[in-house]
């Protein structure tokens, strides 16, 4: 019994790593009971983790607490992983958008939502009134383009193209809301005065619905260009939250697989 | 989320499906965050950085993951590496991460049935219960069971120095490692 009284150290650790039967049998038993000496060794041990102990431990410890949703972290991560947007050359699609004269135009503002004061604009602190409207067109899997009404049903393969009307230059963000309150930030934009397609560089911005399911709401949030507007927009993006202080325009969608419709 | 659902999710995520990425993030971000939050040297922004970096890296390398069941332990390994080097203020963070890539591929060990996640969680719960009432148990309970506070916040709440909480957590982790190693060895000889 030369093993008796032996504790974990560099030598016995090597023996275990080499699967020496004596060492394995001894420590399987010895470590089944608390031992301050061995625990101190394991506490110090970093670097080589031949048994995957660190990971097994962290994984188990991390599983104890209830699972919590982290919408903000996901929005950030999603942005970093590469946004879901798809972009097209303007040509054909832009023409089709111009032709879709029957597109439903609507605008929803915070004041309207809260029932305080109907209207199409919101006065911002230190700024003028910004009027904002959002319209959209879907490009379907078969290539067809369809103007969207509020609550329209779309397959996940569809891509939504956005057109806006803004009364002035503005900083904006586009987001996708889910009924559970989670928000996906889709991107930051600068809006021109007038009616325009939402663009990224010289291409149209498109929102892919891939991986989405059920009711979703597209939100365009804008701040009239001026002091603090860009900062407010960027802060909202970073927080992954649709801001209350911006002018908002929303479009409801329902993402449903083609064969279920 | 069952093990099978996780495996399916991983396959879909490896193929680029965004909803699968989201589900994996929501399912695993808690345990990744716990690893980073245990380092009292890290502030909230750094913890966030560890979480983000871990998933960016894991998702990028997902197609290389050989056993979907090892995904959870793979994540916490990446997270611990990041957290450790950040807390040491290492300048070689990028390099450490690159080294890790090789390591991960070859050393993610097969986990014997006696050490599947459910069994390990049971072992940990038992170890917590066995702790005598006192500061270590209180710290472990707050940090791992409730899982809302960081090591820093617990230190503030308990009126301790920042590093005292990390030390207590490390001591408890060593108990867990001791118990898991014993089972691992027993499974090896059994
Ligand atoms: Zn010992």
Image (tube, coloured by chain):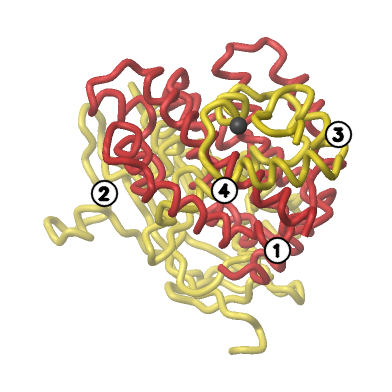
**In the image, the residue with mark 1 has its CB under 8 Å from the nearest atom of ligand 1:** no
Discs 1/4, front: 1
Tell me the element at label 1.
Answer: helix
The red one among the chains is: B
Question: With respect to residue A260, does A101 lie above or below?
Answer: above
Q: Nearer the viewer, mark 3 or mark 1?
A: 1
Q: Nearer the viewer, mark 2 or mark 3?
A: 3
* Residue B99, horizontal then vertical, whole percent: 81, 26
Q: CA distance from mark 4 to mark 2?
A: 20 Å
Q: Is residue B92 left or right of residue B87?
A: right
Q: Residue A165's x, y, as percent? A: 44, 50
Q: CA distance from mark 3 to mark 1?
A: 26 Å
Q: Residue furthest front?
A: A1
In the rendered image, which residue does mark 2 sit on? A121
- Both marks 4 and 3 on one chain: no
Tell me, yes or no, whether dots 2 and 3 are on the same chain: no
Q: In what element is the residue under mark 2?
A: strand
Q: Which residue is mark 4?
A: A198
- The residue indicated by pointer 3 is B102
Q: Which chain is yellow?
A: A
Q: CA distance from mark 1 to mark 4?
A: 54 Å
Quadrant occupied by the C terminus of chain B: bottom right
Determine whether the residue tagged by mark 3 lies in a helix, strand or loop. Answer: helix
Instruction: Work out whether disc 3 and disc 1 sit on a shared chain.
Output: yes
Classify A192 as above or below B168.
below
Asked whether the residues under the numbered discs 4 and 3 touch, taking CB atoms below 8 Å apart as contact, a structural biologist would say no
- Image coords of residue B13 (percent x, y): 72, 58
Give how far apart the Cα atoms at labels 2 and 1 are.
62 Å
Question: Compared to A98, does A77 lie above or below?
Answer: above
Please give the name of the residue rendered at 34% of the width and 59% of the height, measured from the top-left corner: A107
- How far is mark 4 from mark 3, CA to CA? 44 Å
- How packed mark 4 is, by other alpha carbons closer than 10 Å (few <14, some 14-19, many 20 or more), is many
């Amino acid at each position: 019994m030369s093993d008796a009284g032996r504790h974990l150290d560099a030598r016995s650790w090597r023996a275990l790593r080499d699967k020496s039967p004596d060492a394995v049998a001894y420590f399987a038993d010895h470590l089944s009971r608390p031992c301050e000496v061995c625990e101190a060794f394991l506490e110090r041990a970093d670097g080589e983790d031949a048994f995957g102990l660190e990971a097994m431990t962290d994984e188990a410890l991390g599983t104890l607490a209830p699972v919590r949703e982290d919408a903000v972290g996901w929005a950030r991560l999603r942005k970093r992983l590469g946004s879901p947007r798809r972009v097209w050359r303007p040509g054909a699609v832009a023409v089709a958008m111009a032709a879709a004269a029957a597109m439903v135009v609507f605008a929803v503002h915070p004041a309207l939502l809260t029932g305080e004061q109907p209207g199409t604009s919101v006065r911002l602190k230190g700024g003028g009134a910004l009027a904002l409207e959002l319209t959209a067109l879907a490009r379907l899997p078969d290539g067809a383009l369809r103007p969207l009404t509020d609550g329209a049903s779309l397959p996940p393969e569809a891509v939504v193209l956005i057109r806006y009307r803004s009364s002035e230059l503005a900083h904006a963000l586009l987001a996708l809301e889910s009924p559970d309150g989670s928000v996906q930030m889709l991107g930051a934009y600068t809006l021109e005065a007038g009616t325009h397609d939402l663009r990224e560089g010289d291409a149209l911005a498109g929102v892919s619905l891939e991986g989405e399911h059920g009711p979703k709401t597209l939100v365009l949030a804008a701040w009239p260009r001026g002091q603090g507007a860009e900062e407010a927009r960027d802060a909202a993006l970073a927080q992954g939250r649709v801001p209350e202080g911006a002018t908002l325009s929303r479009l409801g969608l329902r993402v449903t697989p083609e064969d279920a419709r | 989320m069952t093990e099978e659902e996780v495996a399916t999710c991983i396959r879909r995520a490896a193929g680029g499906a965004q909803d699968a990425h989201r589900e994996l993030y929501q399912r695993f971000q808690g345990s990744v965050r716990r690893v980073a939050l245990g380092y009292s040297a890290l502030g909230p922004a750094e913890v966030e950085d560890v979480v983000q970096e871990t998933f960016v890296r894991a998702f990028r390398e997902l197609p290389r993951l050989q056993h979907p069941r090892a995904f959870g332990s793979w994540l916490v390994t990446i997270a611990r590496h990041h957290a450790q080097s950040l807390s040491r203020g290492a300048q070689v963070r990028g390099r450490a991460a690159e080294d890790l890539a090789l390591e991960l591929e070859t050393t993610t060990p097969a986990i014997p049935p006696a050490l599947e996640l459910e069994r390990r969680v049971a072992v940990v719960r038992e170890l917590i219960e066995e702790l005598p009432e006192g500061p270590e148990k209180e710290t472990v309970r707050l940090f791992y069971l409730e899982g809302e506070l960081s090591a820093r916040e617990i230190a503030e709440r308990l009126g301790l120095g920042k590093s005292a909480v990390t030390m207590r957590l490390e001591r408890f982790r060593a108990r867990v490692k001791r118990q898991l190693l014993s089972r691992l060895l027993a499974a090896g000889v059994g």
